[in-house]
Amino acid sequence: MKNSIALTKKIKEKAFEEGFDAVGIAKVPGSSRIKLRTASLERWLQAGHQAKMEWMKSARRKNIENLLQGVQSVLAVGLNYYVDMEKTPKDISIARYGWGKDYHKIIEKKLNKIAKFLEKERPNSQWKICVDTSALLDKAWAEEAGIGWIGKHSNIINPTIGSWMFLGHLLSTEALEADEPSKPICGECEQCIEACPTKAIEEPFIINSNKCLAYHTLENRDQQLPKDIINKMGNWVAGCDICQEVCPWNHKNIPNTSEPDLQPSQWILNITKKDALSWSDSKWKETLSKSALKRIKPWMWRRNINSISND
């Protein structure tokens, strides 16, 4: 017990040292809430809310042991990506998550340093790094580890950072001391539900991707977007932040991220609709090479931008 307390303290200190803004630990298999979240995922899939994101059906997502045999603990970390800055001009809108460099690589690099530190402390232990591309119920485990609760818009809300937070997880075979799970405190607030232009938040915590602007601008590979999506897009061409922008927890004095690689790229802040439509495929690929937005193919950028064009 004493050794696990000391190791837990060291790992948390290392996580903060690496620049994470929220750090917590959950024990596997977790509380009954993990089972409830897993059952909720199954209902969400059965309803077809995943749209064409077939990877969400992965059976590995339903049991954390599928990712690391013998896993006993989950280190959950949150990285603030908020920057108090506005994009100008405003004829196209790009979600804040893509303003800096690719967060997957940033988080993986930081978690890898923590994993190597753990290896030195416990040479026989096993570990696995998970970002949001892994078949893990990442939001459920973040909530279980106490770094925030799942809001009605389905994003994790931290009382200090709000929901402007990237998540990462380090699975470990070491038995670490767990934190208290977060308690949802959205209360009666439904501002995110009311603000969604396509009514994609069909009920608290349930997002129907078939109606979601972020899904269609980032994931939809059809040559044409649905008319009902086009009619509600506004200027969003890469993701959508509406449900986060209206959240009262994001209206508090959110600190700016100190992470250098998450500072806004100049092209993001300055690009216009006209400029974007003039870029060649090679220009798009070069510009997006270090961005999480590279999943949006050049032809998709043009499709999305032309969908909002009133010219």
Image: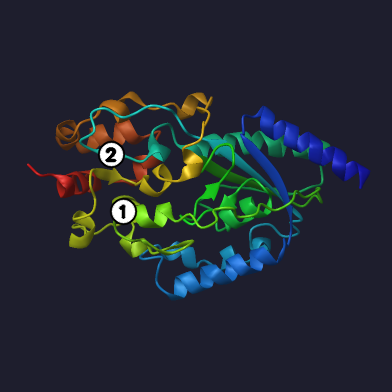
Give the image location of residue 236, x and y in percent.
27, 45
Q: Which residue: 45% across, 36% down?
A: 102
Distance CA(mark 2)–CA(mark 1): 12 Å
Say which element carries label 2.
strand
With respect to residue 198, does 308 lie above or below? above
How many other residues sit within 10 Å of disc 1, few (<14), some (14-19) or many (≥20)? many
How many other residues sit within 10 Å of disc 2, few (<14), some (14-19) or many (≥20)? many
Q: Which residue: 37% across, 45% down?
A: 241
- What's under tag 1, amino acid-wise? Leu
Q: Which mark is residue 93?
A: 2
Q: Which residue: 62% across, 34% down?
A: 20
With respect to residue 46, does 264 lie above or below? above
Q: Which residue: 46% across, 37% down?
A: 251
Kindly tell me whether residue 16 is visible in this rendering: yes
Q: Which residue is mark 1?
A: 213
Q: Where is the C terminus found, in terms of image quarters?
A: top left
Answer whether labels 2 and 1 touch (C-beta < 8 Å). no
Say which element carries label 1.
helix
Q: How many marks?
A: 2
Query: Is residue 134 left or right of 46 when viewed as pictured?
Result: right
- What's under tag 2, amino acid-wise? Ser
